[in-house]
Image (spheres, rainbow, N blue to C red):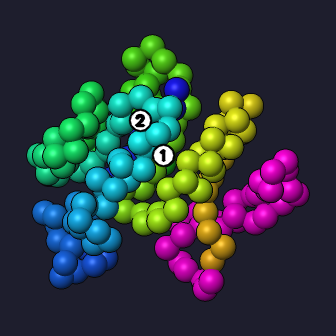
Amino acid sequence: MIQPVILAGGSGTRLWPLSREHKPKQFLPLAGDQSMMQQALGRLDGLPCRAPMLICNEQHRFLAAEQLRQLGVEGAQILLEPVGRNTAPAIALAALRALDQGEDPLLLVLAADHVIQDVGAFHRAVGQAQVLAAQGRLVTFGIVPDRPETGYGYIERGEPLEDGWQVGRLLSVVQ
């Protein structure tokens, strides 16, 4: 079983004035009737998943809980960050929580603010990634950039693996 981890700790500064400190974009319905976080949770339907872990800022705990309730999601864990520390510490928090519960599941780490329109393709990619991750590989999903962006790191494509997957190496990390 996969342990989904939804990263919902954004501060609400990138889409101002819609997105604000007390209601950042991941909790807004920007790409449909549901919030972006609710859509991320909905994409898990049909995957062999445990109840999700949701990581958010302490100030958004009630907003996150209410949106989980609206979807009828049961058994979800909300892990609170007293201070945002970016992606790697949030993933480490989720991994440590899973280990504290006596398990070592495959983590499917998803951003709460992504738009993925082809859910079938997403499910197929997760299935393929699950096989590679079970072999001890770290699997990332991404898109080919169409312009330079200082807010992200880059992964250089390497040699192809089976089924079109490629080995890559990290070129830069943004702090």
List the residue tagged with mark 1: 109
Q: Residue at x 41, y 35 (%)?
A: 94
Residue at the image position 43 percent from the left and 44 percent from the top: 44
Q: Is residue 87 magenta?
A: no
Horizontally, residue 131 falls left or right of residue 7, namely right
User: Residue 92: where, in percent of width, then height?
Assistant: 46, 38
Q: Is residue 147 magenta?
A: yes
**SS assignment at label 2:** helix
> Most extreme residue toward the bottom, as rendered?
147
Cβ–Cβ under 8 Å for marks 1 and 2: yes
> Can you name the residue that lies furthest to the top here?
102
Nearer the observer: mark 1 or 2; the answer is 1
Of 144 and 10, the residue lying toward us: 144
Secondary-structure class at tag 1: strand
Magenta residues, start to end: 146-175
Spatial separation of the CA atoms under disc 1 and disc 2: 9 Å
> Label 2 sits on what residue type?
Ala
Q: Residue 61 got which mark?
A: none
User: What residue lies at 29% left-to-right and 68% top-to-bottom?
Assistant: 32
In the rendered view, would you say 48 is above or below 114?
A: above
Q: How many numbered discs, if any?
A: 2
Residue at the spot of label 2 = 94
